[in-house]
Image: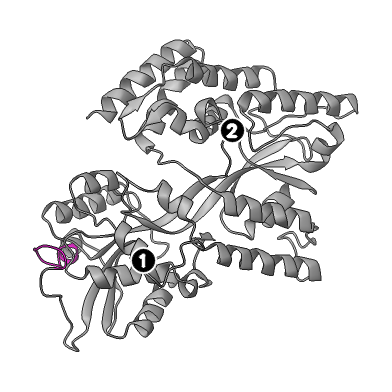
């Protein structure tokens, strides 16, 4: 029987989303197939080979469960204008009616609203009682970072990181002392100035800390990295009119005026840093070692109360939730637990870093062996000269990754829109900060 259902019309989507039927979760008869298996439904935004493999492996482990995956889009299929909003609306309609699929991929969906209205199951007790999961191996700092009202409502399949990659040769020659685990943007500016000055003294010109990076880009980076300092999601309060936020705006502009950053491209070797996403262990090498011969992997600076905290910025991927009215909650948890098993986390089709520390360490160790034996080359065909010390740095960054912040895209959008009036010279930083504060406060209290 073909399991994959491509939902190509809103009618079909709504029909499948409401397939579970009404009633209190776990207290009604579980839907079953004609073979007598418990029917378990999973809603995805987009199909992929990973989920095809996952379905097969899961059903092999649990032959009494028939997992049926409903994907709104096939892999690589483009989203048309307004199409995702239609998908959200259809999902919201199903949730509001008290119906829906057993397991839901929640990327792009209003999870906080679902939780406040009791649509999603708190998986905290299931997570604590599951004897098949080894909590000391799980990236619990990331799971805890996703908690809402102290409850676990979503479980991510994996995660990625954002780091700062430095020109190791230039930083080493300058011999400027700093600690990237505790630095803020003021120290970043100070270090950059010193390194640029020493590089110029040695005969190198047109050196920039960040190239192809206009001040509005730097401001956005700063806001991403320091979001928690200005937005209290739980209390629905923002402090964008604070001196610290005004200072952040002014810092971004000052670094542009002082030519520490530039909107222009830099010559090869004339850039000191690069803000880089690390989507998998392999990208610790492929990205940084294509940028610099001897890259230095560092944490991005922070500001305000978040300065001094350790850990790389975390982005989660493919979060999953269980419908609170699902009649197959026990089977749904078995699927979530299977997602966190070594068998699922080691599947080659899975993207990103693993939610298991042991899997991440294994993948990095395997990569280290390939590099050491010469079996790995960069995309440009050159060998990757990565020291054992650097591999230890990779492991430390992955294991300590804990800076997950629930960024609200609407808040980020408001800040970006209003900040342009400052960077274009139309308004002062203080005026823009007040505009952002007023708009965000109104939005948070809607």
Q: Residue at x 58, y 22 (%)?
A: 252
Task: Give the magenta range.
Answer: 15-26
Residue at which label 2 appears: 308
Colour basis: one colour
Label 1 neighbourhood size at 10 Å, few (<14), some (14-19), many (20+)? some
442 sits left or right of 216 in the view: left
Q: Quadrant of the N terminus?
A: bottom left
Count of numbered badges drawn on the protein:
2
Residue at which label 1 appears: 74
The residue mark sitting in front, 2 or 1, is 2
What whole-number distance in Å separates the C-alpha atoms at marks 2 and 1? 43 Å
Residue 230 visible somewhere in the drawing? yes
Q: Residue at x 50, y 19 (%)?
A: 244
Q: Secondary structure at mark 2?
A: loop
Q: Quadrant of the C terminus?
A: top left
304 sits left or right of 441 in the view: right
Quarter of the image for residue 213 reads top right
Q: Residue at x 57, y 66 (%)?
A: 358
Magenta: main secondary structure equals loop
Above/below status of 77 relative to 168 = below
Above/below status of 397 relative to 352 = above
Residue 146 image position (x, y, % from top left): 39, 48
Q: Residue at x 50, y 31 (%)?
A: 226
């Amino acid at each position: 029987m073909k399991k994959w259902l491509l939902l190509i019309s809103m009618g079909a989507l709504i029909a499948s989303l409401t397939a579970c039927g009404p009633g209190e979760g776990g207290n009604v008869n579980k839907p079953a197939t004609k073979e007598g298996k418990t029917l378990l439904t999973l809603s995805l935004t987009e199909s992929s080979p990973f989920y095809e493999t996952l379905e097969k492996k899961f059903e092999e482990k649990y032959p009494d469960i028939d997992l049926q995956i409903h994907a709104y889009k096939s892999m690589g299929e483009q989203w048309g204008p307004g199409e995702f909003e239609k998908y959200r609306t259809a999902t919201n309609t199903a949730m509001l009616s008290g119906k829906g699929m057993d397991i839901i991929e929640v990327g792009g969906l209003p999870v906080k609203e679902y939780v406040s209205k009791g649509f999603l199951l708190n998986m905290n007790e299931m997570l604590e009682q599951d004897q098949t999961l080894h909590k000391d191996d799980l990236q619990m700092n990331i799971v805890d970072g996703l908690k809402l009202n102290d409850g676990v409502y979503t479980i991510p399949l994996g995660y990625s990181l954002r780091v700062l990659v430095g020109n190791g040769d230039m930083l080493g020659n300058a011999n400027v002392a700093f600690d990237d685990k505790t630095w803020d943007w003021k120290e970043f500016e100070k270090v950059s100035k010193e390194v640029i000055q020493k590089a110029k003294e040695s005969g190198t010109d047109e050196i920039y800390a960040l190239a192809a990076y206009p001040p509005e880009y730097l401001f956005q980076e700063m806001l991403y990295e320091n979001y928690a300092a200005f937005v209290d999601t739980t209390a629905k309060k923002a402090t964008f009119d604070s001196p610290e936020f005004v200072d952040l705006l002014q810092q971004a502009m000052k670094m542009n005026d002082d030519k520490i950053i530039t909107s222009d491209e830099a010559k090869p070797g004339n850039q000191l840093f690069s803000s880089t996403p690390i989507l998998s262990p392999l990208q610790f090498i492929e990205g940084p070692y294509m940028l610099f011969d001897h890259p230095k992997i560092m944490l991005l600076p922070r500001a305000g109360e978040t300065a001094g905290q350790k850990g790389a910025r975390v982005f989660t991927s493919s979060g999953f939730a269980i419908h609170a009215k699902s009649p197959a909650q026990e089977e749904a948890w078995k699927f979530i637990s299977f997602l966190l098993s070594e068998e699922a986390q080691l599947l080659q089709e899975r993207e990103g870093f693993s939610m298991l520390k042991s899997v991440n360490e294994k993948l990095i160790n395997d990569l280290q062996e390939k590099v050491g034996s010469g079996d790995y080359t960069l995309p440009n065909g050159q060998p990757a000269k990565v020291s054992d010390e650097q591999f230890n740095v990779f492991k430390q960054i992955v294991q300590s990754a804990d800076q997950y912040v629930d960024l609200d895209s609407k808040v980020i959008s408001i800040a970006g829109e209003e900040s342009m009036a400052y960077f274009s010279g139309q308004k002062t930083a203080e005026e823009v900060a007040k505009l952002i504060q007023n708009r965000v406060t109104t939005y948070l209290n809607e």
